[in-house]
Image (cartoon, rainbow, N blue to C red):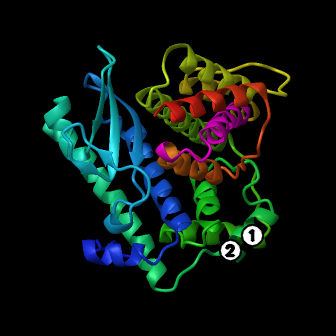
Amino acid sequence: MEKLVTLTYQRRIAILSQLTAEQVAALNEFTRYALLSQFHTWHYLKNTDWEFAGLVIDPYYERASSHRGENLYCDCGRRLKNQFILRSRSSGRQLKLGITHFQQHASIPEKVAKEIQAGVNEIHLYMDSILQRYVAGHSFPHAAFDYAVKHGGFTNRESTILYQRCQLFANVDLPLYQTDELALRQLVRELKNGTRPRLTRKQILQLKETIATDWRQLEQQLTLIQFQLSEAGVTGQDLHRIKSNGINYALQRRKSRFLIHQWKEITDLTLNKARAQLAIKLRELAFYALILGDEEKFSLQQTQICQSLAAHHISVKGSRSFGVREAQKIIEELSDAS
């Protein structure tokens, strides 16, 4: 495995300036997903009054001179690249913080704050490694990924992190992190040798846990979008209608209206039913992609929605359903009022 080397600030900006807007967005979605996974895996806040409610990343933070969309800020007023959303379990209060202010604003113990910072630093090292591979001439291994897909290497494994990262980076031709590429090439070797093992019980459980993590992250993204809509002035009955329309849109044309409400319920389902619940959640996210449209004030959210959907190989098509049109009208009226 290659040694991870931190890029200097100037070098990172120089490399990022060579990337397209789509590549920057994909790289930030990789970072966002990794940060969310860190929080879910290590349960950093389990002994505090706070719970992790979401994460927003400014994909153009490094490009101060050509910034697109809105800046992100800590509650103290400092401009941020990574804005963490915390919610108080006791009062419901929301905080928008940078990683360095967890202890100061949320009274999170110093030890926990340091653990979170260490996790963030590790992920930034991974991102730097991808940038260094890019400038060294590496590109996405399309031939290996296409072979694995064509020969069933990801059949029943579409929800794995490796598949999602491949989908994300294949669309913009960014190189994979070295460990991911090695895992992909190992899969191709197994397929060429005729190895196509059936899923074991342990693998099925792991897949359902991965699906549960995906579902939870999508739910948090939806919660954050709804919170930002309320911050922008969509409140009361209008916000309730948008939420209801989103759920109804996600359930359209389904024989069953069975819907889970907690991510832990995923592991009690069959693999097919777990996948169906993830598909519903993705369709609900696609609803927000449709209603936010080209609204400039929601451009950052739109970028993140599109990258989340792309990571799951979901395309958004226009819709004339009543729920979509009603929600779009609410958003348009909000823009007119401002």
- Mark 1 neighbour density, 10 Å: few (under 14) some (14–19) many (20 or more): few
Q: Is residue 8 visible?
A: no
Q: Is residue 25 left or right of residue 91?
A: right
Magenta stretch contains residue 137: no
Q: Residue at x 63, y 72 (%)?
A: 185
- Amino acid type at circle 2 is His
Q: In the picture shown, does residue 229 fall above or below 137?
A: above
Could you say which disc has been placed on residue 100 in the image?
A: none
Which dot marks residue 142?
2
Which numbered circle lies on residue 146?
1
Classify mark 2: helix, strand or loop.
Answer: helix
Q: Position of residue 43 (x, y in %)?
A: 35, 34
Residue 56 percent coordinates (x, y) = 41, 45
Look at the image and tell me in which quarter the N terminus lies: bottom left
Q: Which residues are magenta?
A: 275-297
Q: Residue at x 77, y 73 (%)?
A: 192
Based on the displayed image, in which of its 4 quarters is residue 338 positioned? top left
- The answer to whether the residue labelled 2 contacts the one labelled 1, judged by CB atoms less than 8 Å apart, is yes
Residue 294: image location, x then y, percent? 59, 47
**In this rendering, does residue 4 appear at all?**
yes
Relative to 135, say whether 282 is above or below: above
